[in-house]
Amino acid sequence: MERSFLFDQLSESEHEQVLFGSDPDTGLKCIIAIHSTVLGPSLGGTRFWNYNTEEEAINDVLRLSRGMTYKAAVSGLNMGGGKGVIIGNPYTDKSEMLWRRYGKFIESLNGRYITAEDVGVSTRDMEWVSMETDYVGGMPKYLGGSGDPSVMTAYGNFVGMKAGAKKVWGSDNLEGKKVLVQGVGHVGSLLCRHLAASGAEILISDIREEHLQSVSSTMKCTVVDPDKVYETTADIYAPCALGGTLNDETIPLLQCKLIAGAANNQLLNEDVHAKLLRQSEICYLPDFVINAGGIINIGAETDMGYQEGMARSRTEEIYGRVETILKLAEKHDLTTHEAAMKIAQDRITAMKKLKSSF
């Protein structure tokens, strides 16, 4: 009997559970993927996106949820990895009832999955979800939550970028460095603010004109055509849009020395393209390491409310984490992706042994 596309993928990626939800009355079509709960309940934002096919949505939620497992593990958090996607147009298809129905779906999982904001989703959307379930992170600060995770995600990306710059150029000073930010939505635009304050020369690219106008109206920057991103000369390339931008076609075109961006799953093929970047003498900072500020921010939500100082100090630890990964990669002749995965997987394996010993 021919095996199914989905079960082949689940077997390969070692997911624990994948759930599909549909509600014709609200138009909800969603998928929640729980990759691992070894370290704790799975945490990962919900992405609202107009996928071309259902297969594309499945691929995305599987890759994103797996990435969340390793993001939490390498960051020292007691959380597992999960992700939710809603198929639809985030600009036209949202409604209170859709979000509340989605909240009921999450509630049925009894805490195995905790959601938050992601691409196409706002804190206001999460308020509606929270009307039906308590398993929501990143709630607005006026409700005791940590607020928009993009703020700390961008800060962590900036901190990690500085650590990468120190490795490449011997100094973490970004003044005068030419940084190309691809995707200037929530995270990308906030990253540009940090770069502007550091004295970097900023180049921006985005498929949405309103995003470009918003950033270029508040700071000095150069707009790059989306079709010219990969061949544009820059010191640092910061992919902050969707994943898969580092692949067979783009890597040979790159004119940079350091890659440090917040987009998830930047490597189209983790093994092949991490090695291709090393062969090209481009220092790649694994996305799940330097974009962990958002999940760290949510982890700073405690019974006493959001602890912003804790979130900031733990996000700043990304600097040292990047240094450790770069040293490990050099010492053992690994790609930076392999080094980061080793640290994360070692922690997961140790926890499995600990849990099985009682």
Image (cartoon, grey):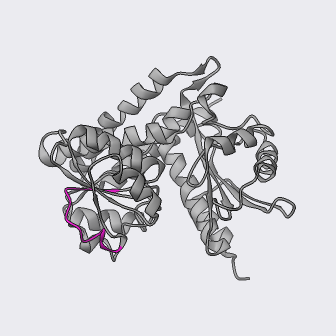
Evaluate whether residue 94 shows in this view: yes
Please name whichever residue, 349 or 43, is drawn nearer the observer in this view of the structure: 43
Q: Is 18 above or below relative to 143?
A: below
Left or right side of 63 for 250: left
Q: What residue range appears in magenta?
A: 227-238
Where is residue 55 shown, x and y percent of the image?
64, 73
User: Image point 42% across, 28% down: which residue?
Assistant: 312
Quadrant location of residue 248?
bottom left
Q: In what quadrant of the picture does the C terminus appear? A: top right
Left or right side of 55 for 246: left
Please name whichever residue, 29 or 83, is drawn nearer the observer in this view of the structure: 29
Where is residue 332 shown, x and y percent of the image?
25, 50
User: Image point 43% across, 68% down: which residue?
Assistant: 268
Q: How many marks?
A: 0
Quadrant location of residue 207?
bottom left
Asked whether 236 falls inside the magenta stretch, the response is yes
Evaluate whether residue 77 shows in this view: no
User: Image point 36% across, 31% down: which residue?
Assistant: 317
User: Image point 40% across, 25% down: which residue?
Assistant: 313
